[in-house]
Each structure stands twice: as C-alpha cells, then as structure tokens.
Image (tube, helix red, strand yellow):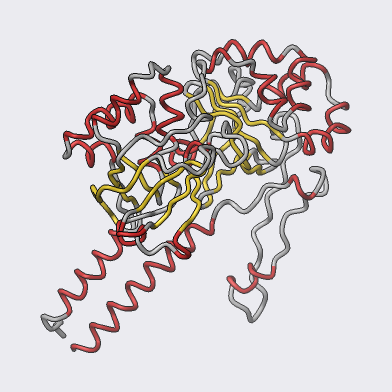
C-alpha cells in the first residue's frame, strides 16, 4: 500500500514542529548582524554573560548601541561592575515587541540576571516595564526611584518565545549594579557565605581548617555548594560522630575545583570531581538537571540548588537544601531487586506493584536519593508518541 502525496508535507510539518522545540540561540551571532551593537556584544563576551544567555531557555536581552555604551565606559567601572550593570539588561522572561505593548495594567516588574546573582539586595535586581502613552515603553530599575532610565527603540531579533533582543535607548542606571565590585578572589569566602544564610557551614570550614583549601582554589576556579544553616543544624548529630579526617573530607566534598555558572550546571550534566577527590578515593557526585532545577546526586542523597550566593567567574557559590553525603563515608541506599512477574500478570504490572528499596540504614528519609530523573525521558517519549500518532492518523486518512 502506498502513501498518497499529501502525507509528505504533513510529516515535514510535524518534524519541523519537533525540531523547532529544541532550537538553540546564540546571542553573539544575533548581535553580530548589527554593527551598532558591537561594543555591547563585546562586553557580553568578556564578562561571560553571552554564555549564560545562550543557556537560558526563555530570556530578553536589552541591547544598548555603541553610543549608549560609551556613556557607561566613561564611568571607568571595573569589568566585574560592568558585568553587574549588563546583567540588569537581561530579563528572565520573554518580552517581544508585541508583549511590550500589551502589558496587563500597563506596568509589570520583571527579574533580571543581576537579581539571580544573589548580589542585588531587596528588589534592586528588578526592572519595571511601563507601557506609556503614544506607544512608548519605558524601563526603570527598582532602585532608581522609579526614574525611567531608557525607552524601547525597536525589536532587533526575536525567536518566540525563546529569546527576544530589543534595542533600548540608554543604559539602565542602578546604584546597586554600579557599586564597586572587586574580583572574586578579593572576597572573603567564609564571610560571604555567613552573610547569605550559610554561617553554620562557613563556621565548620574555619574550625576544621578546610577553609584554606577552598581559598587556595578560588583564583583557579571554584564552585561551592553550601548547605543552609537550617540544614547544617539538623545534620550536626551525624557530623559529630565523624572522625576529624572524615569531617574535613565531608566539607571538601562540597567544593568543585572548577568554575560552573548555573547555566553550565544545567547543560553540562555528569560526574563532578570535588576537592576531596584523591586518587582511588573518588568522592564524586553527579549533576543532573530536572527542568530548571539542578540536582546533585551522591548515591546516598540528592540535593537541589536553591539559590545563588555569588556567581563571578572564577568563583560560584550556591545554596543547597541538603548536606552532600559521599558514599565513601555514608552507606548508600541498596538497589531494589528485580521484581518477578506475578502469575497471570504482565511483568510491567508486577514491577509497578514492587516495593522500593529499603533505605532504613541511610538516615533521615529526606536524605534519600531521588528518582533518577526519568521524568524527562518520559516527557520526551510522550512527545515522540504524539508526533507518531498524528502522523499515522494522517497517513490512514489519505490511504
């Protein structure tokens, strides 16, 4: 039986729909088509913001032309401060030309990448977007007394509803973003964590001497996963039962000797060596994204990143909701035995009824390893099934 011609364009349309959902954008290439944004494009690259933009699934970039960038550069800010200022021009939501002129209530507040760094106190990392009379749209950082710093000029490029690049008239002026920012190595790591809800963890680093190892790795690149105070306080009874060398190993297990932005963690899943890794002593864990969430799997527990304390190459510090327990020090959850099919039932039915692994030897139930991220595979399989079903249905209609 042969397929009639109308099926071919239908299949092409479905395949186009499938691949369009996995489209990746490249802000550097998008701006390279417009020479008037060459300076803005250059600073997105050297501040590493371009890579962050490319890893985001939904984002808006407010580009400023070369004249506007000249006003910023005339302030002679450090490259780290320039990064903070430009981060304020990157919204964590999609605002195309049409959406800008259809804002509900005429005004909305949107979070920026500066807010995501964890260095913007209060609402200083937010920008107010206002649809004004005469078709104009204004932008006002929240810490600038509501003064409109810039207005919308035109749409530069849009990939609905993935990325929107819009031209705004001026740099968004923000006292907090323009405040002097030193190099990451200038920061006192433990003091920084103590001020951001990780004092208990920083105190342990100081008391054991592990702080020195963390500090020595900052210039070469360091990522720290910091359990919050409440998490550490709940874990202290177990911590006190460890030997002194084990305590140091546990703490160094929370540091990775490589800089990883949140975008990098989302896209570069896999095994991570830690500061505790030495020869045959693996002390590693697996990074696995679950949608926008980033999870750290140790075979004993699965922790989730809950916030950013600092993200300035070469140093990144993130808050996590559990203490990372290495399998070298803590007993891993036993694997579930393969279920046998019940008589008269399918194997899949028996598997669905089989109990999970016994985790009684591992500690608190909240510390157990989560689902191995199978949900993403299920979603992908569901999507392919829908595509095939639509195709087969269309095929039968034309046979």
Asked if 149 appears above or below 190 in the picture, the reply is below
| Quadrant of residue 42 within the rendered picture | top left
- Residue 228 appears in which quarter of the rendering? top right
Quadrant of the drawing holding the N terminus: bottom left
Say if 245 sits above or below 178 in the image: above
Residue beneath the point at 50% across and 52% down:
109
**Vertical comparison of 21 with 163: above or below:** below
Quadrant assignment for the C terminus: bottom left
Residue toward you, 77 or 164: 77
Q: How many marks?
A: 0
Residue that appears at 68% across and 49% down: 335
Which residue is located at x 80 percent, y 15 percent? 207
Residue 271 spot, x, y in % from top left:
52, 34
Viewer-nearest residue: 59 or 370: 59
State the residue at coordinates (34%, 42%): 62
**Extreme residue in the left direction:** 5
- The location of residue 264, given as percent across then percent down, is 45, 36
In the shown orientation, is residue 65 left or right of residue 54? left
Q: Residue 325's x, y, as percent?
A: 71, 34
Between 304 and 109, the one nearer to me in the picture: 109
**Is 77 rendered above or below residue 236?**
above
Q: Residue furthest front?
A: 133
| Residue 180 spot, x, y in % from top left | 51, 19
Is 271 on the left or on the right of 83, as rendered?
Answer: right
Q: Nearer the viewer, residue 228 or 323?
A: 228
């Amino acid at each position: 039986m042969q397929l009639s011609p109308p099926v071919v364009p239908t299949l092409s349309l479905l395949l186009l729909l499938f691949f369009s959902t996995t489209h990746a954008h490249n802000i550097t290439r998008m701006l390279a088509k417009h020479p008037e944004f060459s300076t803005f494009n250059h600073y997105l690259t050297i501040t590493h913001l371009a890579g962050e933009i490319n890893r985001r699934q939904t984002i808006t970039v407010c580009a400023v032309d070369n004249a506007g960038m000249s006003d910023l550069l005339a302030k002679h800010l450090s490259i780290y401060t320039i990064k903070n200022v430009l981060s304020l021009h990157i919204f964590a939501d999609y605002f195309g030309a049409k959406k800008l002129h259809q804002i509900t209530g005429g005004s909305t507040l949107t979070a920026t990448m500066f807010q995501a760094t964890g260095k913007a106190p209060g609402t200083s990392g937010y920008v107010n977007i206002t649809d004004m009379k005469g078709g104009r749209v204004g932008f006002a950082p929240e810490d600038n007394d509501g003064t409109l710093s810039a207005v919308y000029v035109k749409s530069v490029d849009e990939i609905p509803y993935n990325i929107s690049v819009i031209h705004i008239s001026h740099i968004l002026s923000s006292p907090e973003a323009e405040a002097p920012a030193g190099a990451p190595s200038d920061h006192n790591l433990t003091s920084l964590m103590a001020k951001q809800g990780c004092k208990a963890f920083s105190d342990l680093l100081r008391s054991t001497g592990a702080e020195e190892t963390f500090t020595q790795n900052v210039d070469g690149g360091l990522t720290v996963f910091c359990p919050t105070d409440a998490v550490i306080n709940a874990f202290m009874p177990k911590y006190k039962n460890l030997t002194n060398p084990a305590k140091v190993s546990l703490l160094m297990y929370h540091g990775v000797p490589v800089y990883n932005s949140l975008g990098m963690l989302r896209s570069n899943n896999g095994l991570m060596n830690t500061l505790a890794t030495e020869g045959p002593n693996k002390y590693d864990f697996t990074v696995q994204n679950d949608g926008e969430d980033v999870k750290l799997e140790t075979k004993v527990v699965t922790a989730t990143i809950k916030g950013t304390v600092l993200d300035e190459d070469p140093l990144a510090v993130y808050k996590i909701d559990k203490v990372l327990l290495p399998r070298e020090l803590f007993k891993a959850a036993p694997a579930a035995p393969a279920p046998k099919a019940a008589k008269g039932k399918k194997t899949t039915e028996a598997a669905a009824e089989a109990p999970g692994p016994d985790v009684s030897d591992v500690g608190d139930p909240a510390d157990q390893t989560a689902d191995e991220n199978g949900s993403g595979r299920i979603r992908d399989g569901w999507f392919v099934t829908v595509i095939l079903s639509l195709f087969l249905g269309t095929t039968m209609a034309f046979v």
